Image (cartoon, rainbow, N blue to C red):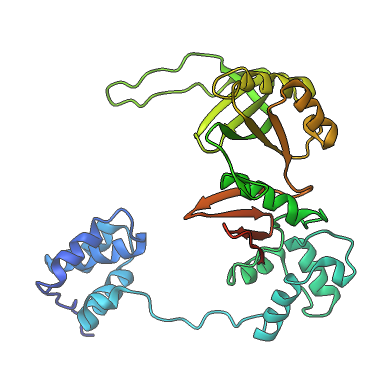
Amino acid sequence: MPVCRARQITVSAADRPRLKALAYSHTAGYQQVIRARIVRDAAHGYSNAKIACRRQVTVDTVRRWRGRYADAGIAGLTDRHRSGRPPRFTPVQIAEVKALACQLPAETGAPLSKWSCPDLASEVVARGIAEAISPATIRRFLAADTIKPWQHQSWILIRDPDFATRAARVLDLYLRVFDGQPLRDDEYVISADEKTSVQARCRCHPTLPPGTARTMRVNHEYDRGGALAYLAAYDVHRAHVIGLCHDTTGIDPFTDLVDEVMTQQPYTSAHRVFWIVDNGSSHRGQAAANRLSRRYPNAVMIHTPVHASWRVIQYSGVAVLKISRAVTVHDTSGKLVMIRW
């Protein structure tokens, strides 16, 4: 019986650096690395048996990849296309699963606020879309289109009937205009707010400084020093912040913030100081405005629209008030436009 001779391997100049990089790669797949090493050993004249012993594989494995490289070069070291297992779900079933995930649970009669993969799997079976399906399969279908029905974002509908009037007054002040008249040089605009539940923490052990071949180390554990409230007053046009820390919020802490600002120059001798505040309990309604004006006659309280998350951006003479799911634009001519998205 004739003896099969090993295929002779000659590595081209173009393949030599690629094979070497693959043979010593730390990121390529293990099988790819072994195949490249088999080919390099064969090019150095090792027998199939010797290569199998060096690489801890069978002789048939060495013969296969030696022959593949001899026939197709370095492209022959990749896996051939395989048909794989037939799909269990048709494209129509996959589309129905995705359509179900894009519906609100309430529309299907499910007593849920949002879908999860196990909920969707149960609903798919209950509707007869598929006889059986796993939550992992549901997640794989949805990941193909980046559908994540278990995530949500909240938004607020504007409910203030005087929204346009209140928003226009705030935006005018940011443009240094009040009741249609430009502000004087000795008039100022203050935006005030509170940040509650700020955790005061201290490390249980001191931080270690960086050293030779060592980064700075910060101890993971800490002691809770309680929760504080930070109250801040921002001078809009002077870009100046005055802040206080208190154990809690309320009328008295807010009054302390007002005292801190109004007892300083230039606010003490100002003609008017406009305080823009939201409708929190510390400064809600006309009672709070009267309380402020009695304490400081030159202080004027301006409330933002009720039940509206907001922030103001000013550029090129145009102020933009972003309110939850809407943008309000107010220009210097007094035109107020609501743009929803």
Q: Residue furthest left?
A: 13
Q: Nearer the viewer, residue 218 or 42?
A: 218
Instruction: Reply above or below: 247 against 147.
Output: above
Viewport quadrant of the C terminus:
bottom right
Q: Is residue 116 visible?
A: yes
**What residue lies at 32% left-to-right and 72% top-to-bottom?**
60
**What residue lies at 65% left-to-right and 59% top-to-bottom?**
328
Instruction: Reply above or below: 17 against 219.
Output: below
- Residue 188 appears left or right of 20: right
Q: Residue furthest top?
A: 205
- x, y percentage for residue 29? 36, 61
**What residue lies at 64% left-to-right and 20% top-to-bottom?**
245
Looking at the rendered structure, the number of numbered marks drawn on it comes to: 0
Instruction: Reply above or below: 13 against 234.
Output: below
**The quarter of the displayed image where residue 94 is located:** bottom right
**The quarter of the displayed image where residue 236 is located:** top right
Instruction: Reply above or below: 46 against 96.
Output: above
Q: Nearer the viewer, residue 105 or 294?
A: 294
- x, y percentage for residue 242? 57, 25
- Residue 3 appears left or right of 146: left
Q: Nearer the viewer, residue 192 or 169?
A: 169
Q: Nearer the viewer, residue 81 or 49?
A: 81
Q: Is residue 46 visible?
A: no
- x, y percentage for residue 85? 57, 79
- Residue 186 appears left or right of 120: left
Viewport quadrant of the N terminus:
bottom left
- x, y percentage for residue 235? 56, 33
